[in-house]
Image (cartoon, rainbow, N blue to C red):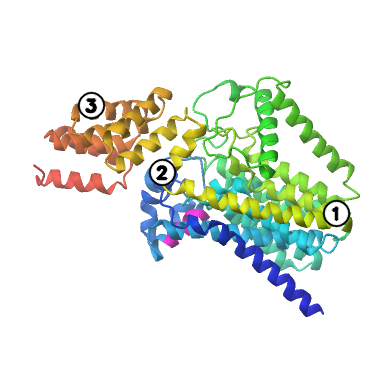
Amino acid sequence: MQRNKKIILMVCGLLVFLAPFVTYLNSVHNGFLAGDDEEIILRNAYLRDAGDFYKFFTQNFKAGSGVTSNYYRPFQLLTYGIIAKTIGIKPAPFHLASILFHSLCGLLIYLVFLRLLYPAVSLPIIVLTALLWASLPIHNEEIVGATGLGSPAYLFWMLAGILAFLNFAGGNKIRWYIVCLMSFILSLFSKESAVVFPGLVLGMHIACMHAGSLKKLRLKRLLLLHAPFWLLAFIYIALRLTLLNFENTLNFYNSANIFTQNFSFRLYTFFSVVGRGLTIIFLPIGLHPEKSWPIFTSFFAPQVFWSFSVLTLLIALAVVLRKKNPIFSFGIFWFFFSYLPMSNLAVMINALAWDHWFYVPAAGILLSLASLLRKKSVQKIAYLLLAAGVTIFSIISIARNNYWKDTETLSRFILRYESGSAKTWNNLAIALAEKGRYQEAIEGYSRAIALEDSYPQSHHNLANAYASLGKYDLAEEEYLKAIAMDNRFYYSYLALGKLYLVMGEKGKAADYLQKALEIYPGLAEAKKLLKKLRLNNLP
């Protein structure tokens, strides 16, 4: 009997693991996209030489392509480096890596929920809830891009750490405690948001003590047990603010504005975004990247007030049920606490609302939901609703995967909702230029510049289109504008060097190529051209 039960649990786990592969299989053939895929993979010189892999741990996320970034994600880069060296730089293996880690997350969510809920909550409810999380359409924009490994990797290591801690607390074997600490470190190496791990583990431990699944500890013993996790978090934050502070870790904005200068405005906007996030987990309408979102300046704005009311109700329920159903309370805590890194309350991110920010919080809200489905009287209807949700969400996700097929398809999809997105017009123009449709590309770049003239990339790309049409004077003008906007934008220095070579101005060419090398010493093309110039091999 016990053996049959183990087999059933293993089969259920295998089902949860395999389901995401079915959902995301049609995304494997999607290509690389303009933007992050270029800077993280295609132009990343460090991926091509295993001798440079140590730099993943000492430099910023995009340093390999000569770009300065706020992010520090060595595990993600190391995974990409292994793929590049063993399989090569082509989209499919990068997509498969993201899908694999997403599937592993689904499996670990199933195992965590099993430890926290079973047998009080039936096995079918736990399986369907894990499947529901794995199929949520809000995950598309995180999983289907070639560089979508960040969130699945950090959640995988966090869940592995949570399971290890449960094993330690249940059997008091020190090796599981060490595994938990190592998982936390690997999670931090995967994405900055993992800094919430100590709070989640502590919250889970307290909830399990109240639920009776773990023995109660005195406060001093509890604090000592969790102190190493908080110490690691403190060391990580200290490093990110000093040695690993590549740009401005706590503020992604280049200048002060009403959002960065007013905590109350950030708080009102936070309420509205989290309220919407709670909605789109279960009602995935209007999902798309590059979402524009207003900065709310009044608590009584309808979207702020109603979101605040719903969120307050959830917190009130968590407080009321903390003794009767501590796992429900923990799930609500998971939802809010895991969202804090994206909240803009402490660290100000230069974005207000992205669907994939609820990748991890969604697991918490589903844990709370599953914890309520204990009574047999509600289980039959729960089975039907959860199964229907898994089916519908999987179909939606499979259909949405196609929007990430290539840059042009994704850009046109986004522009349906965000016609004022300068970044998206720029990306669309890049795709058109790659297809030789230069005049259309020029129109797209011009539209991007007219909407928001703050990115050197748009002027640089417009210059490329002009150069391709032989309009060198216009190209030169746009390259110089890009450099005026960012004097470390080495792409335009390199392009000007090449342009002046074509125009026969060798002196200017050498100057701009040399400047490009000063900014990005690893720029092989500039080195090669300068060497040829010095040998007088170029006409």
Label 2–label 3 contact, CB within 8 A: no
- From the viewer's side, name the closer residue of 438 and 506: 438
**Closer to the observer: label 1 or label 3?**
1
Q: Residue tagged by mark 2? A: 407
- Name the side, left or right, on which 343 lies relative to 210: left
Residue found 25% across the figure and 37% down from its top = 495
How crowded is the residue under tag 1: few (<14 C-alpha within 10 Å), some, or many (20+)? Answer: few
Where residue 46 appears, as percent x and y from the top left, is 38, 53
User: Mark 2 or 3 closer to N-term?
Assistant: 2
- The amino acid beneath tag 1 is Val
Please tell me whether mark 3 sits on a helix, a strand or a loop.
helix
Q: Is residue 367 left or right of residue 93?
A: right
Residue at left offset 55%, top offset 37%: 249
Q: For mark 2, give the secondary structure.
A: helix
Q: Residue beneath label 3, please?
A: 474
192 horizontally vs 523: left or right = right
Q: Separation of disc 2 and disc 3 at Cα?
A: 26 Å
| Residue 19 in picture, x, y percent from top left | 61, 62
Residue mark closest to the camera, 2 vs 1: 1
In the rendered structure, does residue 244 fall within the stretch colored magenta? no
Crowd class of label 2 (few under 14; some 14 to 19; many from 20; radius 10 Å): many
- Rendering coords of residue 446 (x, y %): 34, 26
Mark 3, Cα crowd under 10 Å, few <14 / some 14-19 / many 20+, is some
As drawn, 122 above or below 417: below
Q: Is residue 76 magenta?
A: yes
Residue 378 is marked as 1
